Amino acid sequence: MKYEHFEGTVEELVLLKIREIEEKEHVRILHAVESGSRAWGFASPDSDYDVRFIYARDKNYYLRLRNTRDYIDGELNEVLDMNGWDIKKALQHFHKSNATLFEWSRSPVVYYTTDEWKNLYSRVADRYFSCKSALYHYYGTANKNYHEHLPGDMVRYKKYFYVLRPVLACKWIEERKCPPPVLFDELFDAVLEDEMKAAVRDLLAKKVNMSESDRAPRIAKVDRYLEKKLEYYKALAETMEDDRNPDWEMLEEAFREVALGKG
């Protein structure tokens, strides 16, 4: 993809945009990653780049009485979809065991990171991962995408993976009780049933040569598998015990360290 008159790599472009955001917004970026289908491993040839980042501001910003903004929209065009969360918002979402935040933290495509972020994540993340919250997230994502993007006889094959991946993430959580990997291939190898692998492998081979808008006939075997799994994980999520960590102390300590520049 071309980006105006920029002739470097996407990685160089993202780093350039990071520096622009830091200068314009008076922040320091702690961690920046790919978050969409390119991180999941099933991008189409014309997919854009979904860049997400975590940032921190000067300590005086956090001492204001007025309401303050906790996100930055850095770029949005046909090449880059780039936005980020303030560290305070990120830590609040760790407390909720926000599955999307865990994915940003574990993305296989890291454009930029810091020891400050790596140390923070290694100390607090595992203590706040909730199987129930994550299962609800992935079930809800799979169910929504299935009903929104796979109606009718002709569908976009990429959308199958927007359902398959969260379904397999549910299976990972059920079996392993920890955050699922971001890459689809890792989920495929580890938890997809053997009798489904040939059908899904064939689906993936067809999808990688299709553009975002191309449609093809639905695949009955995959449909039946997804419908069965959606019913199962809905029931499982509803009956699981709430395993969220109610404690704030470790997260608040981490926030003070970052806000005071001691990370």
Image (tube, rainbow, N blue to C red):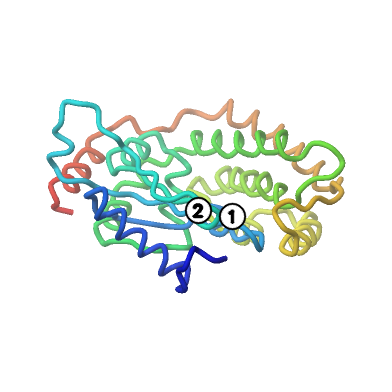
Q: Quadrant of the C terminus?
A: bottom left
- Give how far apart the Cα atoms at labels 2 and 1 are: 8 Å
The one nearer the camera, 169 or 55, is 55
Q: Residue at x 49, y 51 (%)?
A: 81
Q: Nearer the viewer, mark 2 or mark 1?
A: 2
Total marks shown come to: 2
Q: Is residue 7 above or below residue 149?
A: below
Residue type beneath disc 2: Asp
Q: Check the image and name the residue furthest to the bottom.
A: 8
- The label on residue 50 is 2
Residue 221 x %, y %: 84, 47
**Left or right relative to 227: residue 162:** left
Q: Residue at x 16, y 47 (%)?
A: 257
Residue 76 x %, y %: 48, 49
The residue carrying mark 1 is 37
The one nearer the camera, 221 or 71, is 71
Residue type beneath disc 1: Ser
